[in-house]
C-alpha cells in the first residue's frame, strides 16, 4: 500500500509552492512512499529518553555585539541580481488584488 | 616534470625559488583545461582574470612580498560556493546568470593567501546527487574512464584534480559529496569536522551537515589546504574555528602504537569484494607500520541513510524556500499575481531531484508527521553520534571503505532515486556525527578504477587523520 496518499502529495506541493501535474502527483506518491518505507527502519531504534540532536557543535547561544556592520555594497550592486526592478527598488506583483 | 603534475607543495617550492612563475603555472592549467575539459566537463564558468591575477602575484613575489607561500597557486571552486564576480549557479538553471557580490569565507581565505581562482566546478544541482548527472549543465566524466561517473556531488572538483586541471579544488560534503568522488577519481579528499571551515557563502544544502573541504593529489597538500581554509568566522554562528590545529607539524609522526579500528558493519553485505580486499590490505600495511588493528562495531551504521533522508531533505526544503524569483534567480514570465509568481518561478527553476527533496522535506516537517519522522531522526542522530564516541574509546581512528563499489557507469542509477541515495551508506554517518573523514586512494580494481579508503576520527582530529593518511601514502606513493 502506498504510504503517502495523492491528496497528501497535493497538499505538500501547495505548502512547498510547487505546481505539479496529475502525472507528477502519481510519481511523487510512489517515490515518496518508497523512500519513506525505507526510512521507516529508524523506528526499530530505541529512542526513549534520547535527546534530539539538531546540531553537533556543542555551541550554545552564539551571539554577536548588536552593532551595525556595513556591507560595503552600493544599492545598485545589491540590486544587480534582481530580475525586475524600478527606481532602485525590487518590483513584485501586487500582493492585494 | 610537467607543471600540471606538480603537487601544491612542489608548486609552492618552485615559485618560492623562482624556478616557476605564477603566469607559467596559470597558463599550464588553462592549457590543460582547454585540452581535456571538452571530454571531462569538470568546469562551468571560468575566471576571466586568471592571467592578470597571476601577473600581480609574480609582481608581489618579485618585490619580495608574497601574500603567503601559496601566492600564485591556482584553485578551482565547486559551483555551490560563492565567488565574487564569477557566475555561480549551484549547477541549477534556477541560478543561471547569478553573479555573487562577495566571496564565500573559504574562498576569501584562499585569495588572501594569494591563490588564484581558475573557475567553477560542475556538480549535481544544489549538491543533490552522487554522480554529477543531476547537473542542469550536463554531467562530468571520470578521468579514469569517461563512460563512468566521477561521483558526486562534488564530481567536477574531484575530476579537475584527477585530470590535472587544478592542483587544488574546494568541494562541499553534506553526506559524502567530497569523499565519494575523491574515491571514484583516485584523489585525496577531506570532509572536515563540522564547523571547522566557515559555511558563510555556501549555497546552503543542509545547514547542520554541510562542510566545505579540499581535494588534492596528496595527503600533505590536503593538510596544507586545510590550514588555509580553517578558521573562525563571526558570520557563521556554528563556526568552531578556534579549534584550528597545526596540520603539518606532526604529519610525519607515523602510526606506531596507534589503534586503528575496523568497524565490522562497513565490511558486511553489499560491499564489492575488490573494494573490501583493498581496504583490508591497507589495514595490513598499517599493522606492518606498527599500528594496532582492532575490531570494532558501529551498530547504528544501518540507520545512517534512513536518518539522513529525513534530516537532510527537511533542511533542504527549508533552505530552498528562499528561491522565490524576486531578489535573484529564475523568475517566471507567466504570472498574474504574487502567489502565482512564487509557484511558477519555483516550478520552472528547480529540477526533478530538488523538487523531490523539497517535497520529501516538506512532508516530514508538516503537521502530523514531524514527531514520527523529524524528531525521531534527530534522536537516532544522537545515537549515531554516541556510537562513534563509544568506538573512539577503543581506537584512535576508524578505517573503512568510502563506497561499496568503484565508479559506476553513467545512467546506471538514474531511474532509481533510492539506489543513488544508498551510494552514501558509508559516508553519511560522519556528517550526522559531525566528525572528520579523510579519503585517500588505496589501489585499483581489475578495470583500473580507483578504490578509496576512508579514515574517520573524533571531532577536530584532522591532524591525526593526516598523519595516518600520510604514513600510508609515504609507503605506497601517491596514486
Image: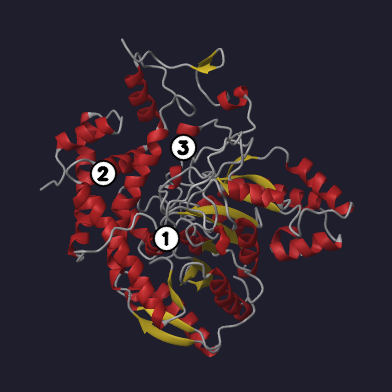
Q: Residue at the far left: name it.
A: A1
Is label 1 in a helix, a strand or a loop? loop
Q: In this view of the protein, can residue B36 be seen by the observer?
A: no
Is label 2 in a helix, a strand or a loop? helix
Q: Which residue is mark 3?
A: B92
Q: Are the two marked residues, 1 and 2, in contact with CB atoms closer than 8 angstroms?
A: no
Could you tell me which residue is drawn at 55 percent across and 77 percent down?
B468
Q: Which residue is mark 2?
A: B365
Please tell me whether residue B249 is drawn above or below residue B152 in the rendered image. below
Q: Pointer 2: residues within 10 angstroms few (<14), some, or many (20+)?
A: many
Say the numbered circle drawn on residue A58: 1
Residue B143 horizontal side relative to residue B47, left or right: left
Q: Chain of mark 3?
A: B
Of circles 1 and 2, the one toward us is 1
Q: Pointer 3: residues within 10 angstroms few (<14), some, or many (20+)?
A: many
Q: Residue at the far top: name it.
A: A97
Q: Pointer 1: residues within 10 angstroms few (<14), some, or many (20+)?
A: few
Q: Are marks 1 and 3 on the same chain?
A: no
Amino acid at each position: 500500500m502506498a504510504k503517502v496518499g495523492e491528496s497528501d502529495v497535493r497538499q505538500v506541493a501547495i505548502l512547498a509552492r510547487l505546481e505539479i501535474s496529475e502525472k507528477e502527483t502519481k510519481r511523487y506518491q510512489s517515490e515518496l512512499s518508497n523512500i519513506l518505507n525505507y526510512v521507516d527502519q529508524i523506528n526499530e531504534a530505541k529512542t526513549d529518553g534520547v535527546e534530539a540532536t539538531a546540531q553537533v557543535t556543542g555551541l550554545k547561544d552564539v551571539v554577536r555585539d548588536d552593532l551595525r556592520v556595513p556591507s560595503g555594497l552600493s544599492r545598485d550592486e545589491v540590486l544587480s541580481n534582481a530580475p525586475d526592478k524600478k527606481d532602485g527598488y525590487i518590483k513584485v506583483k501586487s500582493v492585494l488584488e | 616534470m610537467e607543471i600540471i603534475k606538480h603537487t601544491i607543495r612542489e608548486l609552492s617550492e618552485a615559485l618560492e625559488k623562482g624556478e616557476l612563475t605564477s603566469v607559467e603555472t596559470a597558463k599550464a592549467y588553462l592549457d590543460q583545461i582547454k585540452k581535456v575539459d571538452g571530454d571531462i566537463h569538470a568546469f562551468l564558468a571560468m575566471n576571466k582574470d586568471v592571467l592578470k591575477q597571476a601577473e600581480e602575484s609574480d609582481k608581489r613575489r618579485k618585490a619580495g612580498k608574497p601574500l603567503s607561500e601559496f601566492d600564485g597557486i591556482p584553485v578551482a571552486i565547486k559551483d555551490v560556493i560563492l565567488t565574487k564576480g564569477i557566475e555561480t549557479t549551484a549547477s541549477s538553471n534556477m541560478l543561471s546568470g547569478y553573479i555573487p557580490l562577495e566571496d564565500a569565507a573559504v574562498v576569501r581565505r584562499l585569495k588572501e593567501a594569494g591563490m588564484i581562482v581558475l573557475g567553477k566546478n560542475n556538480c549535481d544541482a544544489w549538491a543533490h546527487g552522487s554522480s554529477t548527472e543531476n547537473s542542469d549543465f550536463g554531467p562530468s566524466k571520470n578521468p579514469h574512464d569517461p563512460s563512468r561517473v566521477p561521483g558526486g556531488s562534488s564530481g567536477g572538483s574531484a575530476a579537475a584534480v584527477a585530470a590535472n586541471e587544478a592542483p587544488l579544488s574546494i568541494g562541499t560534503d553534506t553526506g559524502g559529496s567530497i569523499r565519494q568522488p575523491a574515491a571514484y577519481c583516485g584523489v585525496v579528499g577531506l570532509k572536515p569536522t563540522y564547523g571547522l571551515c566557515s559555511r558563510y557563502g555556501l549555497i546552503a544544502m543542509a545547514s547542520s551537515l554541510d562542510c566545505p573541504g579540499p581535494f588534492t593529489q596528496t595527503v600533505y597538500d590536503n593538510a596544507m589546504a586545510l590550514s588555509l581554509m580553517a578558521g573562525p568566522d563571526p558570520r557563521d554562528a556554528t563556526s568552531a574555528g578556534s579549534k584550528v590545529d597545526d596540520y603539518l607539524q606532526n604529519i610525519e609522526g607515523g602510526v606506531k602504537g596507534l589503534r586503528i579500528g575496523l568497524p565490522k558493519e562497513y565490511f558486511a553485505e553489499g560491499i564489492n569484494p575488490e573494494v573490501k580486499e583493498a581496504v583490508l590490505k591497507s589495514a595490513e600495511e598499517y599493522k606492518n607500520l606498527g599500528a594496532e588493528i582492532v575490531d570494532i562495531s558501529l551498530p547504528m551504521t544501518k540507520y545512517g541513510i534512513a536518518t539522513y533522508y529525513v534530516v537532510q531533505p527537511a533542511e533542504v526544503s527549508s533552505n530552498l524556500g528562499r528561491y522565490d524569483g524576486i531578489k535573484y534567480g529564475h523568475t517566471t514570465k507567466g504570472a498574474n499575481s504574487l502567489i502565482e509568481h512564487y509557484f511558477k518561478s519555483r516550478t520552472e527553476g528547480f529540477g526533478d531531484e530538488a523538487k523531490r527533496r523539497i517535497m520529501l522535506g516538506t512532508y516530514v516537517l508538516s503537521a502530523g508527521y514531524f514527531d514520527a519522522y523529524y524528531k525521531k531522526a534527530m534522536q537516532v542522530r544522537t545515537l549515531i553520534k554516541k556510537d562513534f564516541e563509544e568506538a573512539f574509546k577503543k581506537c584512535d581512528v576508524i578505517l573503512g571503505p568510502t563506497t561499496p563499489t568503484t565508479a559506476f557507469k553513467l545512467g546506471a542509477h538514474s531511474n532509481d532515486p533510492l539506489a543513488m541515495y544508498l551510494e552514501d551508506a558509508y559516508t553519511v554517518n560522519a556528517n550526522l556525527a559531525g566528525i572528520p573523514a579523510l579519503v585517500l586512494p588505496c589501489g585499483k580494481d581489475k578495470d583500473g578504477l580507483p578504490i578509496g579508503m576512508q579514515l574517520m576520527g573524533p571531532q577536530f582530529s584532522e591532524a591525526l587523520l593526516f598523519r595516518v593518511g600520510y604514513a600510508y601514502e609515504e609507503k605506497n606513493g601517491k596514486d
